[in-house]
Amino acid sequence: MAGTTTKTVPDIFQSMEYGPASSPNTATAQAWLDHHSRVLGLFIDGKFVRPADRQTRSLMDSRGGLVCSTLCAVEADISQCASSAMKGFETWSGMSCYQRSKVLLRLASTLGQHGQCVTELCDLCQAPIASSTLVRMLQYYSSWAQLRDTLIANWMPLGVVAVVVSDDCTLYSLFLKVLPALAMGNAVTIVPGQSTAAPVLLVAQLFTAAGVPAGALSVLTGSDMSLAADVAQNPSISYVTYSGNKQDGVNLCKATAGMGVPVSVSPKIGATCPIIIFESADINSALDDVIETVFKKKKEMHWVLCVQESVMDSVVARLQMRMAGLKCVALPSNDARLLVDTAVQDAQHKGAKLMPSCAVPSAGAQYPPTVLCGVAPSSPCVVTPPPGPLLPLMTFRSNTEAVTLGNHSPHGQAASIWTEDLTLALETAKSLSVGSVWVNSHPLSDPCLPFSGHKDSGTCTDGGQEGLYHFLRPYNSCALPRASPLAIDYAKFGTDAPQVIIPDDTASTPKSYSQFVGGKACKAESGCSVAVYPQGGGSVLGYCPDGGQKDVRNAVEAAIKVQPGWMKKSPSARAQSIQSLAKGLEGKRKDIASSISNQTGLPMEEADMEVELSIARLSDWAAYCDKIRGGTLPVPQSGSGFSIPEALGVIGVVLPDKQPLLSMVTVLGAAVSTGNAIIMVPSEKYPLPALTFIQVLQSSDLPAGLVSIIPGRRDQLTKALANHSVIKAIWYWGNHEGCQYLQYTCTNPLKTLRLFCQTDKDGKDSSRDWTHACVLEEMWRNAVQWKSVWIPTA
C-alpha cells in the first residue's frame, strides 16, 4: 500500500529519529486517499472500478474540509457487480469451512497490520471504530465459519446478500451483518452510507488481500438510498438486510415490495432507551456513566433517565456537579438547533425545569448538555426526541412503575439498569421489552451478544449464534420466487366481495361450521357464510364463516388478555397443555381424518397418516418447551452475559393449502410452545380440517383466547392482520400479490414477516414438505425474539 517506509527499528535507534507511529508496512489514511486521487471508485470483482461519466458524492470532515469523493453507481455497475457476486458466491461457498475460517483469521492479522490506517480513515469520516473491535469480530465469526457444518447442520447459505446502511449508521452495525453473512458462506454486496463508504472500501481491499475470492465482497456507493432498491431488484440478490434510521428502512421495504426478495430491518438510530436508577444503586458510578454515555459519546440512541423518587434530590445535585464545565455540543445543522429549541420550550411550558451545563448560545448549531427535570412520559422530547444533547429525567416510586416507564416508548432497543440488588436487576431486565439490557454498566457491544429489536425496533437478530440463521435457510425450503412488483391498489386489496351464501336453518342444509375466537365457537361478525366444496367439485360439504376485520380485532383483544400469563407459565406447564392437545386430537382422529379425505380427495389411509403425523408433531412441540433455551455467552470482558429467548406476542398466520392439518399444528405448536398467542386463518381452499380441529381446542386446557381460528377470504383476513398494530409477526402462505401487500404495509409498526409463495414463477407447486424434521427448528426460531443481559463483575 502507499506510504510505506523502509526504515528498520535498528536504524531508528542509531539515528535517534522519531520512528513511524505504526508498523513499517502500514499506510496512513491520507496516503491511501492520495493514492486514489481522493476519488474512490466502486469495489467490484476484487478491485476498484472507476467508470467514466459517473456522478460523485463528496464526503466532508468535521471542519468542512473535503475527505474524498465517491462514485454513484448506475444500472450497468449493478449488473456487473451482480454477475461478479454470483461467481464469487460459487467460489466462496464451495470452499470448506476450514478454508473460509482461515481466510477470516488471515484478515484479522491483516487488519492488525493496517489498523492505524483504518482507524485514521474512520476518524476522518466521522465513523469511529477501533481496529481492535473489527479484529474481535473477525475472530468470533471465523470460529463460526469453522463450525458451521458441525453445529448448524441441515442449513445452507442464501446466496448473494445485500447489506444496506443509512448515512447515520455506524461501522459496527454494518460489519455485524457483513461478517456473519460471509462466515456462513454467502457473497455480500455492501451499499454503505456516506460516512461509512470510504472505510468500507478500504476494508474491502484488505478483505481481497487476505484471500476472500473476487466478487465475494463488493461495495456499491450512491447518492441516496434509492440505490439499495435498485440493487435489490437484481435477480441475483437473495436477501436484503438493513441497518440505520427507521424511515429509510421503511422506504426500502416499500420500494422492494413485490420483488420476491426478503428484507429485514434493524432501525438502530434514534430509538428512545431508558436508564433506570434505583435507590439501591451506586449513584456516583451510575451518574459517571450517564455523563459518558449521554453527553460525551456519539450516540445512536436517545436516552431517558428514570430515577427512584427517594433518591431524586441526591441524583439531581450530583448530576449538576458533574455537568458543570461540559462544553456545548455541535449539532448536525441549524435546523437541528431549531428542533432542540422547540423541544426545550415545549418541555418548559409543561412544567419541566432546565439544568444546562453552561450558558445557551443565542444562535448557531451548538447546544449545551441539558437535563430536563420533571418531564412527562408523553412529552415530545421523550416520545420524539430531537438530535441534541438533551436528557429527559422522570421519577418513579416502585419497580413496577419503573418497568412501566421503561416500556412506555414504542421502541424496544436497549436499557441500562443500576442497582446493587441482583434479584431486582434480573426481575427488571426480564420485564423490560427490549433487546439488550446492561446492569450497572454503560452500553457494551460484542458480537457474541444477540440483539433482537423488540416492539418497533427491528425485524431481525444481529449478533451471536442466533444472528447467523438470518443468512441461512434449511435445505428443504424454497426461496421466494423473484418477480416484478404488481400494480396493486393497496387501499382496495382484499375488498372484493365473493358470492356469499346464508344457509337456511333446515334439516336438509349441510353442516354450518363455526369459527373459534376467545375460547368459544361462534359465528362471524358479518353473519355470512361461504359454501365449501370437495376437491374436484361436487355437492356442498358445509358452510364456513366469512371472517373479517371485526373478528380479527376480537381475537386480538382476547389474545392480549391471556398471552402475558401464558408466557410466564413454566415450560413444563406449557408442555402438559400441548400434550393434552395431542391426546384430544387422538380422540377426534376419525372425524378429522374424514374431513381431510372429504375435502382434499385423499384416500382415507393417507388422511389418517396425516392425523398420525400431526399427533406426533404436537408431542414434539411439547418436548421442545423445556429443551431449547438461551444460555451464558462467552463475553471477553469480566462479567456474565446471558441470551434469553422470549415470545413475540401475538402472531397472525395465513395457513397453506398443502397438508392442511399437519401444517396447522406445526405453526400452532411453534407459537404456543414459546409463549405466544396465535390467530390462524385456515386454507381458503381446504378449511374443514382446521374447523373440525376446533372441537379439539374446545376440550383442551389452553387458556381461552390463546388460539383463534378465523376462516374466510384469504386476502380480506390478510389485510385485517396486517393493519392491526398489536400483531407482532405474520407468517403467510399465499400468492405473490399477498406477499407484496404485506411487505408494503407492515412497516408502521414494523412486523416480522415470514412469507412463502405456494407456487413458483411457472405456476408449479412450491410448497414445503411439512414432514421434514428441520421444520421444527426453523419454526421455533421464527417464534422467538432474543434478549441479551450483561452483568459486569469487578
Image: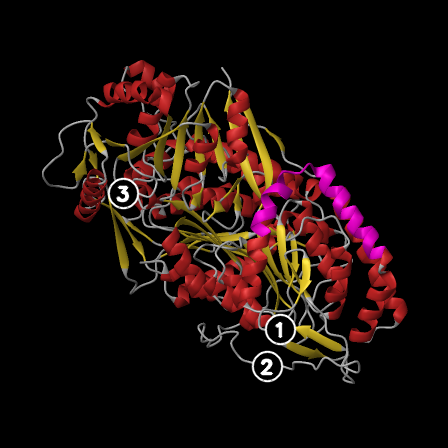
Camera sees residue 8:
no
User: Which one is earlier in the sequence, the residue at label 2 or at label 3?
Assistant: 3
Residue at (52, 48) in percent of width and height: 460
Q: Are marks 1 and 2 in contact (CB under 8 Å)?
A: yes
Residue at (56, 67) in percent of width and height: 718
Quadrant showing the N terminus: top left
Assess whether residue 571 is covered by the magenta stretch. yes
Q: Which residues are magenta?
A: 559-586
For the residues labelled 2 and 3, the Cα–Cα distance comes to 51 Å
For the residues labelled 1 and 2, the Cα–Cα distance comes to 10 Å
Which numbered tag is attached to residue 546? Answer: 1
- Residue 755: x percent and y percent? 59, 62
- Say left or right for 383 vs 446: left
Using the rendered view, name the quadrant where residue 223 is placed: bottom left
Residue at (81, 70) in percent of width and height: 595
- Residue 136: x percent and y percent? 50, 32
Q: Hey, what amino acid is under mark 2?
A: Pro
For the residues labelled 1 and 3, the Cα–Cα distance comes to 49 Å
Q: Callout 1: helix, strand or loop?
A: loop
For mark 3, what is the residue? Answer: 387
Using the rendered view, name the quadrant where residue 566 is placed: top right
User: Which one is earlier in the sequence, the residue at label 1 or at label 3?
Assistant: 3
Which numbered tag is attached to residue 708? Answer: none
Camera sees residue 740:
yes
Q: Residues within 10 Å of mark 3 (few under 14, many from 20)?
A: some
For mark 2, what is the residue? Answer: 498
Name the magenta segment's main secondary structure: helix
Q: Residues within 10 Å of mark 2 (few under 14, many from 20)?
A: few
Assess whether residue 288 is covered by the magenta stretch. no
Q: Callout 3: helix, strand or loop?
A: loop
Residue 190's place in the image compared with 755, above or below, is above
Looking at the picture, tell me which residue is in the foreground, 495 or 465.
495
